[in-house]
Amino acid sequence: MSDIAARVKKIIVDKLGVEESEVNPEASFTNDLGADSLDTVELIMEFEKEFNISIPDEQAETITTVGQAVAYLEEHAK
Amino acid sequence: MDLKRVVVTGIGALTPLGKTLDEYWEGLTNGVSGADFIKQFDCSKFKTRFACEVKDFDATTYLDKKEARKIDRFTQFALVVSDQAVKDAGISKENVDVDRVGVIFASGIGGLITFQEEVVNFANGDGTPRFNPFFIPKMILDIAAGQISMRHGFRGPNFAVVSACASSTNAIIDAYDNIRLGKADIILTGGSEAVVSAAGVGGFNAMKALSERNDDPATASRPFDKDRDGFVMGEGAGMLVLESLEHALKRGAKIYCEIAGGGATADAHHITAPHPEGLGAKNVMTAALKDAGLQASDIDYINVHGTSTPLGDIAETKAILSVFGEHAYNLNISSTKSMTGHCLGAAGALEAIACVMSVVHDIVPPTINHFTDDPELDPKLNFTFNKAQKRTVRAALSNTFGFGGHNASVIVKKYS
């Protein structure tokens, strides 16, 4: 697992209160990990803070699974 | 229409003296001080460096970690006392109609700690707004009532009540009114407060409202003592389950006591100072007695607002003498704030609980930390100084007064 994937996983476990084993690339924040709309906003904010980037709203809306988050951050993280 | 009788069938308490009703009552009757140096934030530059905090509170002992993180400390307190009270009352979805169970719950300020954290984060940034999406729903004062309803599935009347330090007494009166008018069978009521933070302590310090006796926190809250120098901030939550008598009897509930009546008035005088003759306080006790259909002589105990401020304690005493006349000398009077500190929007609930327990056990908790008589106070009044007193308590009255000039009193009496 890449360093970015590990950091993403840690944030998701911490913020959504889920088990590490549930955080697989296909897992959807809302359908599989129990996030509501406010949780997903908070997750994006935490990614921004952790990776020191700004994720525009229109792109944030396309990040709905763990794998999508990791892929986006691997491409954009500084 | 006939008004229904209303009884207390459950209690929850999370206090500076202990985290259960039993610990709270034991602390009160033993005259224990809940004051100590502040642990929640670095207060080394503050004029006041002590408070009555809820000791060693870890929300995850009671709540799911994820849930605890999304709610302010005052709501964490509220959920803890709601669990205690629901259990104590023996309420379950099988023995109540959840559409007729409400929550009317108070706070004086709401999520000040959350507000402070979020604004400080923003101020420390570059101007880009990065507010947490839970900021507003964590902070707003009504969220405790909402969260309680979600946790227990109660769908009856649900709202918050605010009148600063009178808030939870007003909540109890609203709950009482809703039940006696037949609008609900059961209402979980009370209040919660948690503002031991830089903004909370700094704000009250700026008003010169807080005691600055940093060399001896445990004796700082000394209502009616000549050398009192302001109130000691407290935090915590109290909940009472109010229920129509007929509903309580039908389901075989344990009954602590009966709510006799309540009153609410305003000083219409000053934002923080009490009316010098205690006019609003006099009117509110008179209104509560009238609502209860009781004579002054029917009251045995007054749990006073008595915050340990120079002006407030004198104004309230004048009001008691004016309303109760000669019977004032037969009363036991005490300020349990001498032990709990001033829990602000939770004070009314915690002090109403003290009155309930006093009526149940025939014990009056003391006003601790009395060292020197104040020549401005009538020496014939019994302030229950320093030690609890045993006496029959037929009915007890609780006074609370809030910044803004709000006054609220509630009377509880033995159930028979």
Image: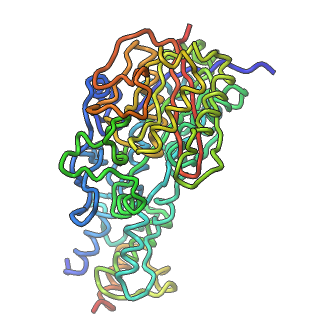
Kindly indicate the quadrant of the structure image that contains residue B85: top left
Instruction: Give how far across and how far down residue A17 sits, in percent.
Output: 32, 58
Q: Is residue A54 above or below residue B39?
A: below
Q: Is residue B410 above or below residue B50?
A: above
Identify the residue shown where x is 34% and y is 59%.
B197
Identify the residue shown where x is 58% and y is 12%.
B249
Identify the residue shown where x is 27% and y is 39%.
B34
Report the side of B263 relative to A58 (left or right): right
Q: Is residue B154 above or below residue A31?
A: above
Instruction: Give how far across and how far down residue B127 sits, in percent.
Output: 43, 87
Report the side of B255 relative to B155 (left or right): left
Identify the residue shown where x is 54% and y is 15%.
B327
Quarter holding the N terminus of chain B is top right
Q: Nearer the viewer, residue B332 or A15?
A: B332
Quarter holding the C terminus of chain B is top right
Q: Nearer the viewer, residue B146 or B347?
A: B347
